[in-house]
Image (cartoon, rainbow, N blue to C red):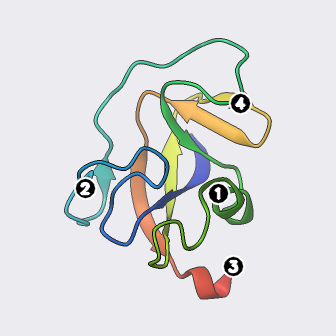
Amino acid sequence: MTIAYKVFTHDLCSPIQGGEPIWDGRLPFRLPPVPVDMSDADCAAGWNAAPTPEDALIIAGLWGNGYPARLYRVESDLPIVRGIKLRAATWEVLQEIDVRTV
């Protein structure tokens, strides 16, 4: 299993794509499976995460919509690695990380 970090908005939406909340916040939670782009593109289809909390916050931002971001520790089998991004069909969301300690 690969441990990584993923950011959501304060109300658990995608910080980049927007839309409806992904889930209700109960943990652990498995993100719904999505198609994954297997190309060499740095940014492509799939659930994206980062290898470190700092990288996740660089990619998604800390105040993307005017509210503080929520950072989570996630894990997945064999994600695709592209630069500082990892993508997979799904991630298991395990634990919220206090961004004040990163």
- Marks 2 and 3 sit apart, C-alpha to C-alpha, by 24 Å
Residue 50 percent across, percent down from the top left: 65, 49
Q: Quadrant of the C terminus?
A: bottom right
Tell me the quarter of the image containing the N terminus: top right
Crowd around label 1: few <14 · some 14–19 · many ≥20 (10 Å)? many
Q: Are marks 2 and 3 in contact (CB under 8 Å)?
A: no
* Residue hosting label 3: 102
**Other-residue count near label 4 (Cα within 10 Å), few / some / many at <14 / 14–19 / ≥20:** some
Determine whether label 1 and label 4 are within 8 Å by CB. Answer: no
Q: Quadrant of residue 78?
A: top right
State which mark lies toward you, 1 or 4. 1
> Which residue in the structure is indicated by mark 4?
81
Q: Are marks 2 and 1 in contact (CB under 8 Å)?
A: no
The percent coordinates of residue 48 (x first, y second) are 55, 40
Query: Which sits earlier in the primary sequence, circle 1 or circle 4?
Result: 1
Q: Residues within 10 Å of mark 3 (few under 14, many from 20)?
A: few
96 up-or-down from 100: above or below: above
Q: Residue type at mark 4?
A: Val
Q: Position of residue 72 (x, y in %)?
A: 49, 64
Q: Where does label 1 land, which residue?
A: 56
Mark sitting earlier along the chain (2/1): 2
